[in-house]
Image (cartoon, rainbow, N blue to C red):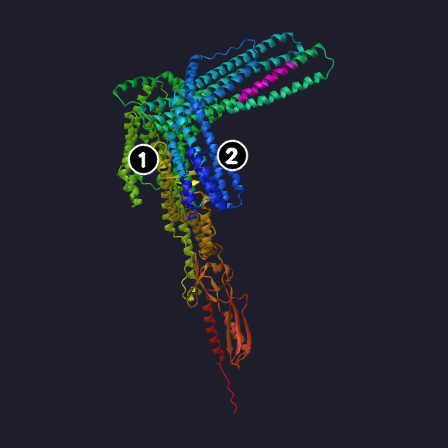
């Protein structure tokens, strides 16, 4: 350590550092030297005394000292009482001591954990032996001995205690089950923790071994050393804890499975005992209820004749009690079964997850998971919620109310009997019957409530069971999708065709189907017969619907047709297309309304429903393409397209429907080997048929692409027609090959998704066609209105013989506010519809295929960076970036095209003028930009709480740097909305009068009479004073000054001026012109002419015309206008 006091004290430090460090050697030198040193230090600096004491303390190996709570408290007290320390340094030293306290607590905790791990390791062998012996001693079957003398209440108490023990044992079993995964996780984490602790411990020891800094006071040194020593002890204890933990896990590897097995057996034992006690309780309750009914029937003969009706009512209540007890036992049994299955499925899900994480996905594991999934799927059907559960619950609830009312009435009657002191024998018997009824009603009420609660609990258990089954199925489907579900096809499988055919052609099976239909009709008669009537009406009215469609086709070709005609045609087309699907769906619904135990009936019922869904979309497309149908008259599709689709949809729908029906029916076949063979063969045929249909419809010379190229020459779908043909034809063939190779489940799922994808695309195509129909009709109406407006404007211009107005007089070109270009609006809107349809198709296909294509989900696993939000960390993935790019592209496109759509469909139907419409579309553009920015920030997981500084900075920037720009922008919007100034208005601002020639978002241009353009910021037009000559009233007064000779007849002058002004056609009669003799001028008598004009358009022209007319009239009357005269009087 360097000497903090150089010079005169060097010899002291040298002597001290040269002293021996052994315990024996310290005794002699310090006895001689220490008094001398003390004397010197007394005569010199106290600081040196502190330094020397610190060196003496350091000579006793400070790194080996330990820290206890007393040392820390003493240090805190020393810091608190030291007045020489400033507040900052004092807080820093106190923080070091607080850290030492935390380290001390961590040390104690680590030592306790280490002792616990050491105890577990030392007793592991004994506990393994005890667990093995306990497993061997545990009985294989749990028996419950209940004597006949045991009462029902005692059995109930024992059952409740057993269930409580079972719940506790189940919780213990779950804890032990999760310990295995936690232990594996800890075994992977401990080595890294050891390495980290060792590095920190080495760093701490290095800091302890360093010399004390020269500028550090003893108080600081003691605080720092205390914190470091406590930190060292904490790390040493933590390292020891980790070592003991590893050792404990190593020696107890065999113990945990034994403990789990014991806990599982205990759970099974207690559950079995609960079931036995529940069974015994139910049986005992049923026996007691039956015995009570028998006893009441026997006692009926002893009851007086007048009281026999009351006794019979008691027997009925007893019989009802017996029924309630029986139903409660059944409901409790079902609830117990569903709960057991729930626990089993939940356990299977956890085990499957664990095996997938440990072993990975193999063919054997995939096959096992598929088998489990099939088993649990059948459980969903078995434990599906009852359809009449709500009605039964309402019925039982009403029964509870009735029993409560009856019990209250009986209790009231008994109370009245108690108030009567004298009673005959018959009265006593009646009282006994009432008390007996009270007990029966009380027990029946309790049984009814118990049954109601059991049913509700059982229904909840069923729903929870179905939910966990769905989770398990989702887990299996996500992991075993690309695993074979069957071996590859072999010729030996053809032998399975014969038994499947015999099963399908069995007359008794179809007889069962026929017998099931009447039962389905009787299950829900109103809905069933209503459905039959609807289906019958659809078939009977088909000819009339076709005639109506032809009539609508003629109406659709009229020049004044509306979209209502198209909507009616769409409704009729749907009614024509839904007839056969409705028939098949009705048959399937009737077969499934009252579920049968015959799998063939269930399979046929599901087949009818699935076939109805399959043919519905094909029938709709076929009816759309009929003669005089939607495609021909309303959509304008080419005849070649309609003929091709209608012809090929006939055989495609018929053959596909038959194959779909066979697949759904054979799915109920019992033998899995035969079922796999038949499903494989039929699915291959279905995929080949779909490939053939797609190959015809999407061929490179298909009429679809021909019309697409004719309507849209730059269409990308035409350029990619070969790719479209290859994909639509190749995918079904690929699925057929997959079925042949053994990927049956994969092929079925992909084939189903392909069908849904085609249905989605066809639906979007019809929606797009309907949208184009709306656009065409609207475009026609708007074009007609514009033509009428242009015609009216031309007629108005032709009827006026005047000039173009004030602006024309001074040759000012007015730039009108932006108006919609109708053809451009139509093009933009159609392009927007194309893009929206493509985006909807993309998102729809992504949603349909996201669960089976890892390529879509894999982008979510590629994390680019992380963003901290409070205590959580949100990753930004590649999928987020792709979404951001898509959002930006969509926003740019929307900013460009959505205002046109708003202008075309909404704003033109309002009373807004062109300026207001322009303002609204501009606001919409900025709103879209802000919305896109919010979406992008959300996708980036940017926390809004951390954007406060950015928003504040932006506010400051807007408030100072961009204040004028923002003010002018907002003022421009106000100008366009409130319209205080319009293009063509005559205004006076800043002493300049002119015509408003252009209004933009930042500034407005005013052109003066000298054709000089004055650019006025919009803010000035809003905040400053403005004179608008033509805002609400364009009537204006024109003033002319006329001077005549002093010799003129003033009455004649006034009459001439009155006549000239009045005769002008632009001068208003009301208010009338005013002719006044105002002043005696130097050279003339001055008259002022005041008259009003209806508008400002011809102000200059009227002035010119009236002045010429006055000059002409004066000349005819001999009245002269004098020249300016000036008399000069000269004095000698």
Front residue of 1003/709: it is: 1003
In the rendered view, tell whether residue 847 sits above or below residue 366: below
Give how far across and how far down residue 947 sits, in percent: 45, 46
- In magenta, the rendered stretch is 435-453
Q: CA distance from mark 1 to mark 2?
A: 94 Å
Looking at the rendered image, the quarter that the N terminus falls into is top left
Q: Is 450 within the magenta?
A: yes
SS for dot 1:
helix
Instruction: Judge from the rendering whether residue 216 lies leftward or rightward of residue 294; answer left or right.
Output: left
Q: Residue furthest bottom?
A: 1132
Q: Residues within 10 Å of mark 1 (few under 14, many from 20)?
A: many
SS for dot 2:
helix
Q: Nearer the viewer, mark 1 or mark 2?
A: 2
Q: Quadrant of residue 996?
A: bottom left
What is the magenta segment's predominant secondary structure? helix
Give how far across and how far down residue 446 sits, in percent: 58, 19
Of labels 1 and 2, earlier in sequence is 2
Give how far across and how far down residue 903 sits, in percent: 42, 49
Q: Is 585 within the magenta?
A: no
In the rendered view, tell whether residue 588 sits above or below residue 636: above
In the rendered view, tell whether residue 232 sits above or below residue 713: above
Instruction: Judge from the rendering whether residue 862 lies leftward or rightward of residue 416; answer left or right.
Output: left
Q: Residues within 10 Å of mark 2 (few under 14, many from 20)?
A: few
In the picture, the disc for residue 70 is 2
């Amino acid at each position: 350590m360097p000497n903090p006091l150089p010079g005169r004290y060097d010899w002291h430090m040298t002597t001290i550092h040269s002293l021996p460090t052994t315990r024996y050697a310290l005794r002699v030198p310090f006895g001689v030297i220490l008094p001398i040193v003390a004397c010197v230090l007394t005569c010199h600096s106290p600081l040196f005394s502190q330094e020397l004491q610190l060196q003496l303390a350091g000579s006793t190996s400070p790194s080996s000292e330990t820290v206890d709570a007393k040392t820390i408290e003493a240090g805190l007290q020393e810091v608190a009482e030291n007045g020489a320390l400033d507040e900052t340094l004092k807080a820093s030293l106190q923080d070091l001591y607080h850290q030492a306290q935390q380290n001390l607590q961590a040390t104690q905790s680590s030592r306790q954990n280490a002792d616990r791990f050491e105890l577990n390791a030392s007793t592991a062998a004994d506990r393994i032996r005890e667990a093995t012996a306990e497993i061997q001693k545990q009985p294989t079957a749990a028996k419950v001995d209940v004597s006949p003398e045991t009462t029902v209440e005692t059995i109930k108490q024992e059952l409740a205690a057993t269930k409580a023990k079972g719940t506790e044992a189940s919780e213990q079993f779950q804890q032990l089950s999760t310990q295995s995964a936690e232990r594996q996780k800890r075994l992977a984490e401990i080595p890294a923790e050891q390495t980290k602790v060792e590095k920190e411990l080495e760093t701490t020891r290095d800091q302890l071994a360093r010399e004390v800094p020269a500028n550090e006071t003893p108080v600081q040194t003691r605080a720092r050393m205390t914190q470091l020593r406590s930190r060292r002890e904490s790390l040493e204890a933590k390292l020891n804890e980790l070592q003991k933990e590893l050792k404990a896990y190593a020696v107890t590897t065999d113990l945990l499975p034994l403990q789990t097995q014991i806990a599982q057996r205990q759970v099974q034992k207690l559950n079995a005992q609960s079931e036995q006690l529940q069974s015994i309780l139910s049986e005992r309750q049923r026996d007691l209820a039956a015995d009570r009914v028998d006893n009441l029937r026997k006692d009926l003969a002893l009851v007086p004749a007048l009281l026999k009706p009351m006794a019979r009512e008691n027997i009925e209540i007893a019989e009802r009690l017996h029924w309630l007890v029986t139903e409660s036992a059944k409901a409790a049994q079902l609830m117990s079964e569903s709960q057991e299955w729930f626990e089993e499925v939940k356990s299977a899900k956890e085990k499957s997850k664990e095996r997938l994480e440990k072993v990975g996905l193999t063919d054997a594991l995939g096959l096992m998971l598929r088998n489990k999934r099939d088993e649990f799927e059948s459980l969903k059907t078995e434990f599906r919620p009852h359809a009449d559960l709500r009605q039964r619950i309402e019925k039982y609830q009403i029964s509870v109310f009735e029993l409560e009312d009856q019990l209250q009435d009986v209790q009231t009657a008994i109370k009245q009997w108690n108030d009567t002191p004298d009673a005959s024998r018959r009265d006593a018997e009646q009282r006994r019957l009432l008390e007996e009824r009270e007990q029966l009603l009380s027990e029946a009420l309790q049984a009814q409530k118990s049954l109601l609660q059991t049913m509700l609990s059982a229904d909840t258990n069923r729903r929870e069971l179905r939910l966990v089954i769905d989770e398990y199925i989702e887990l299996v489907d996500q992991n075993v999708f690309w695993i074979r579900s069957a071996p590859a096809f072999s010729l030996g499988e053809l032998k399975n065709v014969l038994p499947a055919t015999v099963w399908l052609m069995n007359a008794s099976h179809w007889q069962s189907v026929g017998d099931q239909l009447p039962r389905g009709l009787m299950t829900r008669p109103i809905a069933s017969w209503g459905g039959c009537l609807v289906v019958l009406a659809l078939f009977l009215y088909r000819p009339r619907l076709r005639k109506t469609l032809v009539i609508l086709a003629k109406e659709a070709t009229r020049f004044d047709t509306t979209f209502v005609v198209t909507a009616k045609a769409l409704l009729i087309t749907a009614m024509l297309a839904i007839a056969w699907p409705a028939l098949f769906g009705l048959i399937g619904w009737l077969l499934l309304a009252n579920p049968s135990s015959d799998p063939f009936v269930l399979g046929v019922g599901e087949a009818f429903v699935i076939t109805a869904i399959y043919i519905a979309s094909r029938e709709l497309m076929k009816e759309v393409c009929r003669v005089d149908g939607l495609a021909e008259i309303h959509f304008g599709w080419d005849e070649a397209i309609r003929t091709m689709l209608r012809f090929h949809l006939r055989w495609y729908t018929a053959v596909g429907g038959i194959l779909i029906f066979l697949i759904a029916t054979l799915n109920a076949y019992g033998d899995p080997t035969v079922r796999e063979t038949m499903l494989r063969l039929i699915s291959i045929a279905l995929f080949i048929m779909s490939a053939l249909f797609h190959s015809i419809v999407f061929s490179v010379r298909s009429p679809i692409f021909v019309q697409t190229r004719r309507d849209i020459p730059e269409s990308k779908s035409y350029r990619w027609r070969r790719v479209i043909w290859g994909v639509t034809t190749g995918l079904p063939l690929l699925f057929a090959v997959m079925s042949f190779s053994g990927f049956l489940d994969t092929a079925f799922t992909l084939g189903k998704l392909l069908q849904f994808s085609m249905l989605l695309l066809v639906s979007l195509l019809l929606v797009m066609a309907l949208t184009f129909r709306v656009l065409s009709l609207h475009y026609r109406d708007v074009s007609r209105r514009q033509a009428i407006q242009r015609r009216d404007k031309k007629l108005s211009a032709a009827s006026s013989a005047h000039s173009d107005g004030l602006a024309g007089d001074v040759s000012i070109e007015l730039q009108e506010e932006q108006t919609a270009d109708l053809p451009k609006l139509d093009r933009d809107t159609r392009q927007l519809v194309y893009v929206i349809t493509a985006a909807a198709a993309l998102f729809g296909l992504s949603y349909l295929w996201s669960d089976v294509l890892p390529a879509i989900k894999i982008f979510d696993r590629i994390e680019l960076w992380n963003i901290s939000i409070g205590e959580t960390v949100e990753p930004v993935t590649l999928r987020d970036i792709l979404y951001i790019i898509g959002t930006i592209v969509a926003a740019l496109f929307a900013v460009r095209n959505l205002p046109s759509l708003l202008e075309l469909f909404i704003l033109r139907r309002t009373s807004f003028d062109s300026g207001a419409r322009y303002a609204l579309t501009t606001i919409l553009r900025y709103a879209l930009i802000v919305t896109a920015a919010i979406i992008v920030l959300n996708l980036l997981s940017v926390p809004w709480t951390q954007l406060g500084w950015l928003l504040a900075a932006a506010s400051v920037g807007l408030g100072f740097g961009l204040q004028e720009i923002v003010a002018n922008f907002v003022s421009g919007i106000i100008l366009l909305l409130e319209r205080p100034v319009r293009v063509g208005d005559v205004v006076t601002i800043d002493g300049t009068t002119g015509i408003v020639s252009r209004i933009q978002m930042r500034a407005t241009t005013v052109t003066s009479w000298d054709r000089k353009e004055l650019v006025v910021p919009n803010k000035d037009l809003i905040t400053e004073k403005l004179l608008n000559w033509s805002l609400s009233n364009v009537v204006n007064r024109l003033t002319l000054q006329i001077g005549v000779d002093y010799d003129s007849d003033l009455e004649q002058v006034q009459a001439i001026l009155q006549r000239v002004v009045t005769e002008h056609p632009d001068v208003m009669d009301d208010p009338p012109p005013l002719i006044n003799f105002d002043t005696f001028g130097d050279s003339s008598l001055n008259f002022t002419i005041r008259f009003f004009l209806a508008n400002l358009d011809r102000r200059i022209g009227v002035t010119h015309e009236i002045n010429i007319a006055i000059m002409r009239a004066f000349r005819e009357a001999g009245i002269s206008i004098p020249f300016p005269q000036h008399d000069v009087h000269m004095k000698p």
